[in-house]
C-alpha cells in the first residue's frame, strides 16, 4: 500500500495537481507542488541508491 506524503512538510493531505496531467501533486497544507514521495519506501530506496553510487 502506497501512502503519499508531502516531501516538504510531511503532510498526507495531498491531491493530484492539474487532474494528474503533469503527474505532480499539490499539498493542501503548505502549498507545495511537485512530484510526491511515497512514505518509507522511497526514502529507503534513495538511501540505498546513494550508497551504491558513491565511489
Ligand atoms: Zn506540504
Image (cartoon, rainbow, N blue to C red):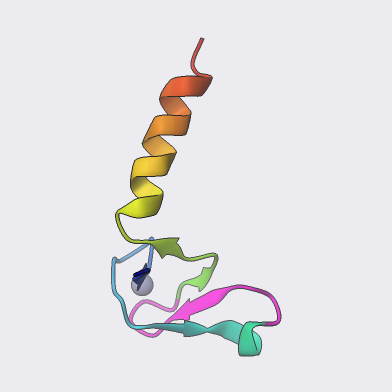
- The residue at 40%/32% (across/down) is 48
- The residue at 29%/66% (across/down) is 10
Please state which of residues 34 and 38 is positioned toward the viewer in this rendering: 38
Residue 19, horizontal then vertical, whole percent = 63, 90
Question: Which of the four quarters of the rendered structure image does ligand 1 lie in?
Answer: bottom left
Farthest bottom residue?
19
Q: Is residue 18 above or below residue 25?
A: below
Q: Which residues are magenta?
A: 21-31
- Quarter of the image with the N terminus is bottom left
* Horizontal arrangement in the rendering, residue 5 relative to residue 20 (left or right): left
Residue 30, horizontal then vertical, whole percent = 36, 76
Image quadrant assignment for residue 45 = top left
Residue 47, horizontal then vertical, whole percent = 37, 35
Asked whether residue 34 is drawn in magenta, I would say: no
The mark tally for this picture is 0
Residue 24, horizontal then vertical, whole percent = 59, 73
Image quadrant assignment for residue 13 = bottom left
State whether the magenta stretch is mostly helix, strand or loop: loop
Farthest right residue?
21
Image quadrant assignment for residue 9 = bottom left
Please state which of residues 32 and 38 is positioned toward the viewer in this rendering: 38
- The residue at 39%/62% (across/down) is 38
Farthest top residue?
55
Asked whether residue 27 is drawn in magenta, I would say: yes
Amino acid at each position: 500500500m502506497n501512502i503519499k506524503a508531502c516531501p516538504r512538510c510531511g503532510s498526507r493531505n495531498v491531491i493530484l495537481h492539474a487532474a494528474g496531467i503533469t503527474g505532480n501533486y499539490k499539498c493542501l497544507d503548505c502549498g507545495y507542488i511537485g512530484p510526491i514521495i511515497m512514505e518509507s519506501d522511497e526514502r529507503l530506496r534513495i538511501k540505498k541508491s546513494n550508497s551504491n553510487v558513491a565511489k
